[in-house]
Amino acid sequence: MLTDGGTAHLRPITPDDTEALQRFHLDQSAESVYLRFFAPMPRLSERDLERFTHVDHHDRVALVTTVGDDIVGVGRYDRVAPDEAEVAFNIADSHQGRGLGSVLLEHLAFAAREHGVRRFVAEVLPQNRKMVGVFRDAGFEVTHSYGDGVVSLAFDIDPTEASIAVMAAREHRAEASSLHALLHPRSVVVVGASRNRRSVGAAVLAHLVEGGFTGAVHAVNPEAFEIGGVESYPRVSDVPAPVDLAVVAVPAEAVPDVVRDCAAVGVRGVVVVSAGFAETGEEGATRQRELVRLARAHGMRVVGPNSFGILNTDPAVRLNASLAPELPPSGGLGLFGQSGALGVAVLSSAARRGLGVSSFASAGNRADVSGNDLMQYWESDPATSVVGLYLESVGNPRKFSRVARRLARAKPVVVVKSGISGYGVPPGHTVRATRAPREALDAMLRQAGVIRVENIHQLFDVAQVLVHQPLPAGQRIGVVGNSEALAALVADAAVSWGLELARPPVSLHPEATAEEFRNALEGVFGGDPEGPADAVVACFIPPLTTDDTDVATALAEVSAGSGTTTVACFLGTRVVSAQLSVPGTHEGETCVVPSYPSPEDAVRALAAVTRYAQWKRRDPGLRPHLTGCDPGQARAVVSAALAGAPEHPSGVRVPDVAVAELLGCYGIGLWPSRVARDPEGAVAAADELGWPIAVKFADERLRERRDLGGVRLDVADEAELRTDLAAMTARLDAAGETAPAGGHFFVVQPMAPAGVPVVVRTMEDPLFGPIVSFGMAGDASELLGDVSHRIPPLTDVDVADLVRTVRAAPRLFGYRGTPPLDVASLEDLIAAVSQLADDVPELAHLDLGPVVVAQRGVTVLSAEARVARTAARADSGGRRSLA
């Protein structure tokens, strides 16, 4: 993705690029050639072409970016020392200013780090300010010197917080720009428009025109000169004016030709409403991949295929390039869906509730544009204040978490995620397989500050509060109504959802007048000696003698002047006309009180918004600064474990000595242990390690069986040790456990400080990437599922939450009079494990347990690791635009 929202294909150079590289050079201006080579060079010599296109991709790496079949940028590095390389770029004159140099630098640095290069150097002419700017703005600490008319630059390429922030900001701008081009086109062409009013193309064309699109509308149909008052052309390339957006509604097999035609005239994006792609099987999946390849190679984005379309209600645009018959009213809610049928339901629900929409997109098969792209756009879109996503699948959870966390700090994000039953993903969606526990997705969403709801109904319940009301300042609520029973229901619901009652509910008599309601409401909003409520729930059973519209007006007026979050329940009625909307305190502002047909709906929505407000107010934390980490050595340990090892579904078990070395790379120490095969060996180990000791079966399967008594603690001397070993062996024999060749082995360790045993684990999931898990050691946690999960990278706040969200966490903080334990050291351990998992994707599984948390320090008694050769992560350091 480039800064103007277009796309380019970045790949290694090959010998087949010789002719294309010469064409690229010949198209360059004399000035650009001089800035790159420090001398005039009309043509590249055969020797230069050979040297530039034949590289080993280790000591000499060259990358090219292409648009269509043309090379538009070249970046390369040549190693000049074991850990240093010289880097250079050349960008086509017509593509300068699109961020190509920055993208090439990022990818070259990523490749260089993989091959042991840690420092880049470059020589640049002083007048080449654009290239100097690329290096300076990359977020690295650049040093420079001047001599012989050349500026010499040097910088370490290990990622820094600044360089990571620069990459994220550039990615955000690029993806937001690409969606802005789709949602703010100056001209739209409908390919496949027809005079048959029941056809998809005819519907989209009619909706564009009837919706009042402010730009130019064109139609493509080789058999018609005019359709619905819009002039028609045989092909997109025949349209006499520039085209920004194409809506494609032709048979699937014809779509690639349409995309090629769009590419020839510089169309920025295509919305493919046609079906017949990956949802139909492998042939359709191949067609879908070709569609995306074609579009991206020519700088276009694709919405769909199998899309319901896109909308933008901005009065300056009024784009209805969709199957929705009407453009919804303008408002602050941005909506994203995947299924076309659900697009109808989502827009209909918004309209029924009077919720204005800023923009909407249906991704269909999500072959290119996804919810991640829309979130990038909505973050900087002033018309959008709340984001609602209906997700049938999440193709890149790591990126979703990263983008959503940043967006949620500025604007609330509400997500409906279907598929919790685990029955796979919708046809047509490309999603990696996952082994992650179901709870991992919930943990990821909570970590990112996303409000997860169960269905569309709840999505709009929550959105009504977020769009129309301020965020609650706390979780204390007041309740007022005309029924004690109804007020009791509200109070019970509030307590069950984790809210607090600021004061007892105020209940009026059933026939109370609107003026009595107003007085009661003013009293509740005014607070009491214990402090005002952070939110108010007003509930009413429609009385026989009082007009409920008068009550609604009173509620809206009192609420507008209070600044307090307010929701209403007019029992059995979802909307009470316009009486719940009144002018606000600022010019042009309207204050609306959301109304619900049941108290449970009102309180559930309020509770969800309250939790979000608490998350937003909380310090997001910082990534822990770990000293002494050596990721390079850790990767070397992993590579050695994988070398020559046969593939195994669960990975290759790392030898104990290598596990200790791997953990040591991140400052994690293992408690000493010795393996003994007989009592004499056990006694010798105990003498070496020091008494008292713990002894246990080396076989973890046997150790975990409580009936075998496979763990003995506080063994004080040789006699006690021999007695325990004899008893352990006797139990094995009685249970019929046959000893392996060489007999049963035992592990001997010095006694660790007293404390609470816990377990820290990580796993590398093909979909989520690394997942860090924490729980108390023992059957109770395993059987009850009392385990928490988080997705790295973790901040110190994430680590603290990971520890505290298990239900048994009070055991660490002084439960029932026991002394509080050293939770800070436990959090340091988890932070180190998280960093290790994030740095080393080949670490398929790491199990630290038990880990004893004592009053001072933590002790890792045992560790097991498995490693595996894995595919690149979906959101890795090498920034790829993945489907």
Image (cartoon, rainbow, N blue to C red):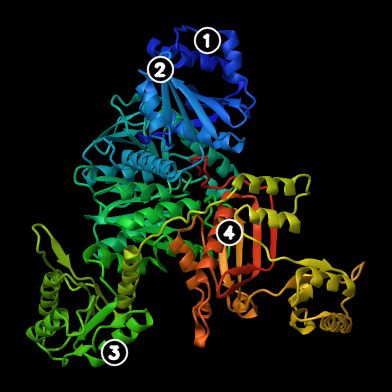
Q: Nearer the viewer, mark 1 or mark 3?
A: 1
Q: Earlier in the sequence, mark 3 or mark 4?
A: 3
The Cα–Cα distance between marks 3 and 4, rounded to whole angstroms, is 48 Å
Label 2 environment density (alpha carbons within 10 Å; few <14, some 14–19, many ≥20): some
Report the quarter where the N terminus lies. top left
Asked whether, in this view, residue 693 is left or right of residue 815, the answer is right
Q: Are marks 2 and 1 in contact (CB under 8 Å)?
A: no
Asked whether, in this view, residue 362 is left or right of residue 423, the answer is left
Q: Amino acid at mark 2?
A: Leu
The Cα–Cα distance between marks 3 and 2, rounded to whole angstroms, is 77 Å
Q: Position of residue 329 (x, y in %)?
A: 22, 55
Q: Earlier in the sequence, mark 1 or mark 3?
A: 1
Q: Earlier in the sequence, mark 3 or mark 2?
A: 2
Residue receiving disc 3:
488
Residue receiving disc 1:
44
Q: Earlier in the sequence, mark 2 or mark 1?
A: 1
Identify the secondary structure beneath mark 2: loop
Residue receiving disc 4:
833
Identify the secondary structure beneath mark 3: helix
